[in-house]
Structures are given as structure tokens and as C-alpha cells.
Image: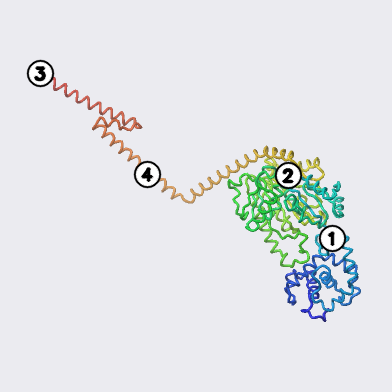
Amino acid sequence: MGDMNRNSNLYIEAARVLHDIYEKKGSIKTCVHRSSFQEKQMLTALVSQTLRFAKVLETVVKRTKLLENNRLLWNDGMLARVLLYDFMIGPGLYKPGRLKVVMVKNKEIITSEFDRLLTAYGVNECSELPSSTTEALPRYVRVNLIKTSVDEVINSFVDKGWTLLHVPTDFSSFKEVCQNLDENQFLRDFHLDDLLVFPAHTDFHDSRLVQDGTVILQDKASCLPAHILSPPEGAVVVDSCAAPGNKTSHMASLMGNKGTIYAFDHKEDRIEVLQERMEGAGVSCKVARCMDFLRVKTDSQTYRDVEYVMVDPSCSGSGIVSRLDSLTNDDASVSQHRLGQLHKLQAQILRHAFSFPKVKKIVYSTCSINEEENEQVCEEIYEKFKERFKIKKVMKNWPERGREGYQKSDRYLRASPTATLTNGFFVACFKRRKRKQEVGSMENGMDQEEVSSEDDQGSQKQNGMDDEEKEGSKKRKKRKEKQSSEEGGEELMEINEKKEKKKKSKKRKRDMYEEETPVKRKEEDMGEKKEEEKEEEVLERSVKKRKERTSKSSHCSDTIDIRDKSEKMDTVESIASVGTENSTAKIHKKKKKRSKD
């Protein structure tokens, strides 16, 4: 292979890039950039598609024994893969040089092996063969309960020739059935009542049910958060990082489209996508807001009744199996610095969710498999709020839990292609403690309610869903009644806490004011006294003036201020004395006149 011109052969250079990727020397972009091949876009496309169909191509190379019988391939499996991809799946060979001889010479056996794979997977074109990353995952279809019921959708598929299989009683048997579904076979999901399972790679994009929003194509792992949060009908919910909106529409479906969902995203284009999906799904109970969730004033009147919060923040997406991160991430893309930045943002968003005054339940989820984004975020936040909230264990018989070594590992929920036939996922549920439990858990060092709740789970269905996670209007009404009965005590507790906080803040401000500005306060007090003295002087002068006026003219007595009774009495006495003096003078004059006569 070394005697060929490096710049003249696309396939030789693509094989070298693939070797670098598998040896973790860089990502696709990094390795292609280092290459001296001029057509970078062409090289990137070939490398990416070869990685996508890696398992199929590897199978063909082994069964056709291309490396054993063709010395031109230099026993290089990567070179054989890139040639096979363009020869059978891609657009055709591009200037292969002498390597064309290998493909032409073995065309019959290569074609025969691809035909066998087409038959085995029930597809017509090589491009429809399963990719290496999604071969084992079934096709999940979520029923939109706003528009229809699960039974109606099942009947619709049965009428079109599909066969409904019985759901096994244990999950291991369920997995086996899902992995071996024949064409036109489907069944209900083992854990989620509104989810149906179809053979892998079943194409529903042209289906009327998908186009009119009756069903939603959504991976099972992505359906877990809404079921675990399980807001009842009429609830007030916040979806902190809502776009593109599958989880938002799922919550609306479980709520019967009754209540309010505040859906936040900080990008206008993503909000537009969310609005379109909500309209297609018939969701009318949402309020889309284009703003950063961290800037939401959680104590405002608008959000005073929020009780349920969904936190599904931006993450590395390392759990999405259709991505080739396990092969293409370089050291920079998975560095501790990058994970540290994501961890910081995720923790901030989750912490902000706890600031809603009446929040009862918070669900945190990511499509990442990194502990830095999952267990470490939850453990950090739990330490800050453990006096008021607990991490609740949900879906008791779910087969995969959190990574070992953490305080609440057994209460976290993980999903993976191998264990659950889904994308990689993580979910944690925070639930507010009852008032008695807040005191008791701190004194006894344990979660009394968690113990009793886990005991109560033994009487539930085998699917492990607790009461709040079961579907059905009757059970939702019971939950609502139970929540309303608990709400009074919680509100009273919150009101008392607010009063105490206000008292403490006022006392603190008063103490600070007295300590920091004693001179200023004395000056203000003196000023207030002087003003009061001036007001008294003005009042006394006005009283004197009124007395003078009343003494000069009797008709002015009507203007006497009735508020001052003493003034009125003084005025009356003065008038009476004047009248007495005048009458005695007249009597003396009459006596003198008589004496003269």
C-alpha cells in the first residue's frame, strides 16, 4: 500500500483515517484535516458512512475472505471496508486504480453475500441495511393520548395486517421477543403503557398516524422522564429546556391536555420547532417562552402554582447510539474541561428548579452516559436540598441503575442499548419530603417515608410503576385528592417560613441601621422633634388668633374650632363677662339719675 501515491487514492487515505480514529488519535474532523488528500468533503463522507455500516461491512469482509485472497488489499480490513461501501452501498468507486481489480474479481461472491443480508433483514436496498450503531434497537411508537387511545391505535395496525404479540411476564423474555420480531409483528411495551414496540428500522415516516400526530416516533428512554414526573390533570408544570418538544407533548398527553406547561428555550428557532410540534400533536395547554430558564423569576405571581419541573438540559449526547462518539471523540471533545463546563451548567439549571416555592417533584434527565453529567450533578444538588427533598426510587423492576460508588446509586435510573434496548439515558427523581419527615429524617438520619414507600411498592403492579406513574383517570383523580390534602400543610409551612424570613430580614436591616448610622438617626430624631415643636407653636398661634376674633365680634363664634372644647368655653366665658360689665354700668347710671331727681 505504501507504493501508491497518497494524494491520488481516496480509499487508501480513507483507510488511514479510519485506523487513526480506531486508535483514538482524533475525531473524524481532526484526522481528515491532517490528511493531505485534497477533497476533504469527499473523504469525510466516505469515512463517516463506512463507520456507520461498520458491522455489515466487517461481516462481508470475513465471509468473503477478501483479505486472504487479495494481496492488493495488504491485509488491511479498513481498506476492504471503504472499497466495499462505495462498491455496494455508496455512489460507486471513485478512481480506485488497481484496487478496482479486487472488487471486479470478487463481484459475484460480494453480491451474493449482500443479497443474503438483504433477505435476512427484510430490506430491498443495501442502503437500508442496519447501521452498526442501531442494529439492536427496536422501533418505538408513542401513542398521543390527546388524539386517540392505545387500543384504537392497536386496532388500526391490526386492520393493516400487523400481528399483536402477547407481552411476556419477565423483562428478559420481553427483550428476546423484541430482538426477534418478524415483519408485521408488534407488541405493547413492558414498562410504559402508551408505548408500542415494532421491528428495528420499521419506516413509519409516511404513515398517516405519524403525519397527523396520532402517534409520535420516540425512543423508549426519552419517554421515561414524563412518566416518572407524571403530572396529574390540571397541574402547573415547567419544562426548563423544552425544545424540540417531545417531552413537552408527552407530558401534555399524560395530563389529558388539561393544565399549564411553561416551556422554555433560549433560541427562537428552537421555539418555532417546538410550536410546530405542539400544533401537530394537538397540545393546547402549553405556554412557550423564548428565554433562558436561569433568568426566570421563580417567585413571581406567574409561577406561584408550579409544582412539577422537568429538567432535561444540554448534554454531551454520548448516550445516543446513532452517534459514533465511541469511535470519533478525540481527547479534546471528551476532556475533563468540557465535561466540567457541562456539569456546571447542568447543576445551575437543576438548582434553579428547586427555587419554585410550591414545587413538589423534579425530574432530571440526560441522554449522556458520563457520570460527570449524571450522578455527580445529582449528588451535588441533593446535598444542598436534602432537608426538604429526597431522591425517590422509581420503576422498581427497571433492570439498570446508577453507577456504583455514589450515595444514591440504587435510586437513579440508567438505560443502555444492551440492558434496555434503548439509547443511553439517565433519570433521577427529586420529591419534596412531608413536614414530619423533614424533622424525623434529620433526627434519625434516615428517610422514613422512603422506607414506607418502598414497602408499599410491593402491592403494586409488576411493571414497577408507583401510583403517581400509572395511567388512568381514576388513579389520577385519587392522586390529585391526595396531593390537595397534603398541599394545605405544605402551604402553611411555606407561609410560616416566609414570615420568619421577613422578620429576620427586617430585624437584620434594623440592627445594621442602628449600628452603622447612630449619628444620622439622632439627627433625624432631633429634626422630627423640632418639626413637632414648630407645629405646636403654629397651632397655639392659630388658637390665640381665633380667641381674639371671637372676643371682638360675637358672630365670629360660629367659626370656633369645635375640636378644642376648652377654647370654646373660654370664649363663652369672655363674652358673658363683657355682657355683665355693660349691664352693671347701666344700673349705676340709673341710680345716680334718681338721686339727682
N-terminal of the two: label 2 or label 4?
A: 2
Viewer-proximal residue among 594 and 311: 311
Note whether 168 is above or below 121 in the view shown. above
What's the residue at 60%, 41% (across, down)?
495
Viewer-proximal residue among 137 and 554: 137
For the C terminus, the image quarter is top left
Which residue bears the numbered disc 3? 595
Note whether 315 is above or below 58 in the view shown. above
C-alpha distance separating marks 2 and 4: 62 Å
Kind of residue at disc 2: Asp
Note whether 586 is above or below 169 in the view shown. above
Evaluate if marks 3 and 4 touch, with contact meaning CB atoms under 8 Å apart.
no
Evaluate if marks 1 and 3 touch, with contact meaning CB atoms under 8 Å apart.
no
Q: Which labelled disc corresponds to residue 531?
A: 4
Which residue bears the numbered disc 1? 123
C-alpha distance separating marks 2 and 3: 118 Å
C-alpha distance separating marks 3 and 4: 64 Å
Q: Which labelled disc corresponds to residue 447?
A: 2
Q: Residues within 10 Å of mark 3 (few under 14, many from 20)?
A: few
N-terminal of the two: label 1 or label 3?
A: 1
N-terminal of the two: label 2 or label 1?
A: 1
